[in-house]
Amino acid sequence: MIRSIASLVILLGIVAQGVRAQEDSLPYRHQESIVYSEIHGTGLICDIFVPKDSPNGLGLIDLVSGAWHSDRGKLHDHMLAQVYTTFCSRGYTVFAMRPGSVSKYAGDELLENVKTAIRYVKSVSNDYNVDPERLGMMGASAGGHLTLLASVTAEDGDTEAKDSLKRHDTRVKAIAVFFPPTDFLDWGGAKPNFDGAIGQLLFAGGVEGRSDEEIEGQARALSPLHRIGEGDLPPYLLIHGDADPMVPLQQSEVFVEAVKAQGGDAELIVKPDGAHPWPTIHEEVAVMADWFDERL
């Protein structure tokens, strides 16, 4: 019995050493589960990844959301895609912001949560030696949608606001996203399915009982494509697979075309045979990092 306990203690010690060695090999220090705001009595959470070596003074907001859910599993997906390893190894401080999920918030509230996230990052930028005027922002799928929507509806700060976060604006310098929904009125030549996550995004509880006019109006309001032209636009990079079974490539194509039509700067990289996502997406994360290096 004593020998078995001793063996277990030794085994646990070896495992702990392995975990510490793995953590030591990472290019960042990971700050977990920081509450960046409170809404309806619940906290909005973020994780912050701080580079261990040679910080470059640049901050990147990574909007963590998939199918408009932002549980910790989505954060793990971004880890697997090497988002934090890639950017922190280049000196970026990465703020992984989780704006909530459609099980709790509809699209209008999620958008406000995203803008609160941007304001929070600006409010703590000095604490992390990050330039608030040189922030980048990225997201994938639903996170890409919310990133684009926040960018085309950016707001000024109110210097006299009682809420100190509201004193900060919600503009960022450059935006790059993967396979984002951008138009809920035309989903690859058809109407989207409003019975699932998109319907929950439009209205709390979904579209049941809503008129066609209500659905169309809210679909337009939450479509980044149809909000372009409301303010100045940052430069954009969109990366999208041409075999995406969930979000049509058309969604990125029309957004890039519309930004260019407004005189803006937008680029689309099409991943041949890319799905949603694809196994080698870490390679495109590195491409995205190169682009941010140039833009920021």
Image (tube, grey):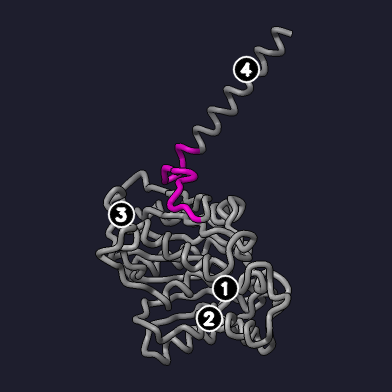
Residue type at numbered disc 3: Ser
Counting every numbered tag in the picture gives 4
> In this figure, which residue is indicated by the disc labeled 2?
221
> In this figure, which residue is indicated by the disc labeled 4?
9
Query: From the viewer's perspective, is 4 left or right of 93?
Result: right
Question: Residue sitting at 52 percent across and 66 percent down?
Answer: 109
Q: In the rendering, which numbered label is found on residue 238?
A: none
Image quadrant in which you'd find residue 175? bottom left
Q: Give the camera-side residue of 28 and 279.
A: 28
Whether pointer 3 and pointer 2 mark residues with C-beta atoms closer than 8 Å, the reply is no
- Badge 4: few (under 14), some or many (20 or more) residues near its Cα, within 10 Å? few
| The C terminus sits in image quarter | bottom left
- Badge 1: few (under 14), some or many (20 or more) residues near its Cα, within 10 Å? many
Q: Is residue 43 magenta?
A: no
> In this figure, which residue is indicated by the disc labeled 3?
125
Magenta highlight: main SS: strand
Residue type at numbered disc 4: Val
Image quadrant in which you'd find residue 134? bottom left
Q: Where 265 falls versus 134 (above or below)?
A: below
> In this figure, which residue is indicated by the disc labeled 1?
179
| The N terminus sits in image quarter | top right
Q: Which residues are magenta?
A: 23-39
